[in-house]
Amino acid sequence: MTQRYVCGFALDTERQQVLLVKKNRGPINMAGMYNGIGGKVNVGEGFRTAMSREFREECGIEVAPEDWTGFHQLRLRNGATVFFFVTVMSQERLAGYSSRTDEEVGRMFVDGVASWATKTFRSPNKKDYLQVLPDLAWLLPMAVQYSYPNLEMQNLGY
């Protein structure tokens, strides 16, 4: 069976902030870069259940499987598939994260198309500009779009 992964974005209710994780493991092109939170889907595990588990393991916030909205799937060159999800929560709940692994979780500002185009996200201290995976230039705007009710992708096998 080909490997399956989940990757999720937790946004605040105003869609201004997102939690991302700084990757220390995985492909060399991801090292030191911020990405959505996620990981491998275990054998027999549902996608939303895997997303909830990975999110809890990496940042300590419980999100029910049904609160994740699937919005995209991507097949990688090696045949693996990544399933992308988004969820929305209050700023207070979003701020309650804590890094639970050796990969640093951070709360970033999502401040518009200019930031997505330049692939930079401003940190909450408004001083640092962070390296993010180039694919976030289109994945994060898509996540924001699909974070609104009734826009979930259909027929993706979620």
Image (spheres, rainbow, N blue to C red):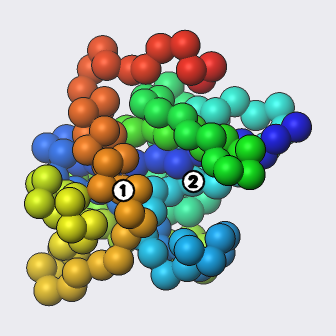
Which image quadrant for residue 97? bottom left
Residue 89 visible in rendering:
no
Q: In terms of secondary structure, where does tag 2 sit?
A: strand
Residue 152 visible in rendering:
yes
Image x and y of residue 14, in percent: 13, 43
Q: Which residue is under mark 2?
A: 38
Q: How would you rate the neighbour count of disc 2 (Cα within 10 Å): few for under 14, some for 14-19, many for 20 or more?
A: many
Q: Name the residue at 35% across, 77% down.
A: 131
In the displayed orientation, state which residue is furthest to the bottom.
127
Query: Going by the image, does 109 lie left or right of 95?
Result: left
State the quadrant of the N terminus: top right
Image x and y of residue 5, in percent: 66, 46
Tell me, yes or no, whether the two marked residues, 1 and 2, touch with CB atoms within 8 Å: no
Q: Amino acid at mark 1?
A: Leu
Image x and y of residue 8, in percent: 47, 47
Whether 84 is drawn above or below 109: the answer is above
Q: Name the residue at 22% across, 58% down.
A: 116
3D distance between C-alphas at marks 1 and 2: 14 Å
State the quadrant of the C terminus: top right
Q: Residue 136: which disc? A: 1
Image x and y of residue 23, in percent: 54, 73
Query: Which marked residue is nearer to the observer: mark 1 or mark 2?
Result: 1
Query: Going by the image, does 12 lie left or right of 99?
Result: left
Marked residue nearer the N-terminal end (1 or 2): 2
Whether 70 is drawn above or below 156: the answer is below
Q: How would you rate the neighbour count of disc 1 (Cα within 10 Å): few for under 14, some for 14-19, many for 20 or more?
A: some
Q: Name the residue at 43% across, 30% down.
A: 71
Q: In terms of secondary structure, where does tag 1 sit?
A: helix
